[in-house]
Amino acid sequence: MSIEFVEDLKRQWMAMIDSIDDPLVIIDSDYNILRQNMAYVREAANAKLLSVRDFRGKKCYHVFAAGAVPCAHCKVREALLSSQNVQWECNALFKNREFQIRAHRMISGSEQEPNLVVVHYRDLTEQKMMQERLAQSDKLAALGKLAGGVAHEINSPLAGILAFSQMALKEMDDTNPHRSDLKEIEEAARKCKSIVENLLGFARQGRTSDIGEFNIFDIVHSTIRLAIPVIRKHQIELVVDLPDEPVKVVANPGKIGQVFLNLITNAIQSMQETGGTLTVDSKWDCSFVTVCVHDTGCGIAAENLKQIFDPFFTTKEVGEGTGLGLSISYSIVKQYGGEVRVQSSPGVGSSFSVVLPLAVHFEPLRVV
Ligand SMILES: Nc1ncnc2c1ncn2[C@@H]1O[C@H](COP(=O)(O)OP(=O)(O)OP(=O)(O)O)[C@@H](O)[C@H]1O
Ligand SMILES: [Mg+2]
């Protein structure tokens, strides 16, 4: 075998390994890096863990996890003792990213490096998010049916309570000692009615009536106008960065307005004690338009992030929030082939993005 042939072979193998999108690394039993592919270099460089490209001799936990000691979750040592591959999942390497890690014991054939391990990292973040979104839409569909049934049952007796309390109030003069009690009953019945109406609206999301093609930015602008008095009242700075040219979507414009009103109301509520900046901006490509509502408010705790789209999940005081705003918004956007995404850091703020297909790409959801 000529040297040229061996060199060629080596180059080909390296090119093949570098073309793999998942990070791959070969380490020895002391976690020293012997070789890595380009994806590994990119990940480490993106995370600003290391700027140099040659990792040889550096410890993998330093490069990939910025640690001073081996990661607590690491099963590399287990892989060295095992005749089989060892696999585990971990979300501690990079913020908000989930990896599946596989460690394979490698027979090196060399006396100097007898115990080597190939570690393969697969980014599961997107896949996990998709699974969560699917589970979320299944859950919402089931809850929508249930909530619709309950709301319907409650609606009639509630209408009776409201009508009779209003009739009794009309017949009562102002000095009657029971008047204020009756007023309380009327007020409470009104609140229940608005919750029931929201629930019925939530259950009806499956229908695609009254839909049309419209410029999404017109709806966003008119929703912002509605919110301006409250924005001013709380001394919140408003930044609107939307283009003049129209971007059209197909949906029920009133419902899309309701989505933005829910998001803007939440953003305002997150800043009402502290003040801050509410920013509305957008981006689009040839398939989707994304409108983002950013705030610099209290943010959402990591343990709450998974629940904010659940009906009735609220962290607000009794009487301040019903916890339906986001679940209704989510199911509206879903109905028109889009999705709602969130990014939030406690104490820094939140960004909610509404992604909708452009009118030319819209396919109405089939209701079964
Ligand atoms: N922009 C935001 N900043 C901080 N927390 C938020 C934000 N948006 C939503 N949340 C959190 O998500 C929860 C659910 O929001 P959602 O809009 O569904 O209900 P709500 O605002 O509590 O009540 P409702 O909208 O029915 O009046 C909120 O109670 C809050 O904890
Ligand atoms: Mg809300």
Image (spheres, grey):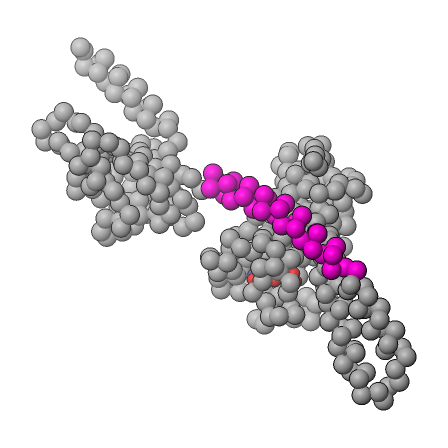
Residue lying furthest top: 1
Q: Main secondary structure of the magenta part?
A: helix
- 283 inside magenta stretch: no
Q: Position of residue 51 (x, y in %)?
A: 32, 44
Query: Is 281 on the left or on the right of 60, as rendered?
Result: right
Query: Is 332 on the left or on the right of 97, as rendered?
Result: right
Span of residues in magenta: 127-156
Residue lying furthest left: 111
Q: Position of residue 245 (x, y in %)?
A: 73, 42
**Residue 289 occupies quadrant:** top right
- 134 inside magenta stretch: yes
Between residue 246 and residue 115, name the one nearer to us: 115
Between residue 265 and residue 166, name the one nearer to us: 166
Q: Is residue 246 visible?
A: no
Q: Position of residue 229 (x, y in %)?
A: 73, 67
Q: Is residue 359 visible?
A: yes
Q: Measured along the vertical axis of the image, is residue 109 above or below residue 22? A: above
- Residue beneath the point at 57% across and 71% down: 274
Q: Measured along the vertical axis of the image, is residue 121 above or below residue 48? A: above
